[in-house]
Amino acid sequence: MRLSLSRKIIVIQAFCVSVYTFFLFRFFNRRARFGEKIPSTGSLYQLPYKKAIDIGWAIQIVAKYISWKNVCRHQAYQAKLLCNLYKIPYMIFVGFKKDAHTNEIEAHAWTVAGGKIITGFCNPDEYMVQSVYKNKWQ
């Protein structure tokens, strides 16, 4: 597959942060922080950032090919690290919903950057948002 140099670089970066988050969540879970917790959802509609779309794409590509656990919170943390690297505003949402079939509570994390969901693709209306995190550029 032919990729531009910037996309090749971001895939390599996504792979490196996926290795980092694997060890972080496996051995140092208490040190993982998404960012500044805010009381309201703030503005989700921002100017589109092509780099934010590329970050989400790269995280999905890497997640497809790695063999270790890379769930929604890992991917949200990877997006946080890459968005901070490129100084892109992001918001990470942590929400819960009740599964209609099993009556169990499901947790989910998703990242919004550039006005779009870039990790943890879901219908946010299905979840009760418990926490919202942002970086300092938001």
Image (tube, helix red, strand yellow):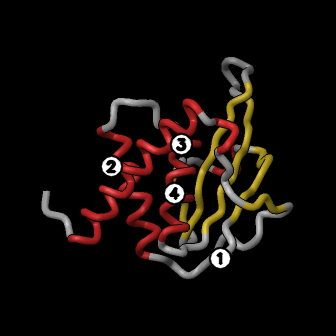
Distance CA(mark 1)–CA(mark 4): 14 Å
Regarding mark 3 in the picture, which secondary structure is present there? Answer: helix
**Residue 74 horizontal/vertical position (percent):** 53, 42
Closer to the eye: label 3 or 2: 3
Earlier sequence position, callout 2 versus callout 1: 2
Q: Residues within 10 Å of mark 4 (few under 14, many from 20)?
A: many
Distance CA(mark 2)–CA(mark 1): 26 Å
| Front-lying residue, 74 or 32 | 32
Distance CA(mark 4)–CA(mark 3): 9 Å
Is 127 located above or below residue 89 in the figure? above
- On the image, numbered disc 1 is attached to which residue? 137
| Front-lying residue, 135 or 91 | 135
Residue 126 image-quadrant placement: top right
- On the image, numbered disc 3 is attached to which residue? 74
Regarding mark 1 in the picture, which secondary structure is present there? Answer: loop
Closer to the eye: label 2 or 1: 1
Residue 84 image-quadrant placement: bottom right
| Front-lying residue, 88 or 81 | 81
Earlier sequence position, callout 3 versus callout 1: 3
Is the C-beta separation of discs 4 and 3 under 8 Å? no
Q: Amino acid at mark 1?
A: Trp
Earlier sequence position, callout 1 versus callout 4: 4
Q: Residues within 10 Å of mark 2 (few under 14, many from 20)?
A: some
Earlier sequence position, callout 3 versus callout 2: 2
Q: Amino acid at mark 2?
A: Ile
Q: Residue at x 72, y 44 (%)?
A: 95
- On the image, numbered disc 2 is attached to which residue? 61
**Residue 115 horizontal/vertical position (percent):** 57, 71
Q: Amino acid at mark 4?
A: Ala
Kindly give the residue lying farthest to the left in the view shown.
2
Q: Which mark is residue 79?
A: 4
Closer to the eye: label 4 or 2: 4
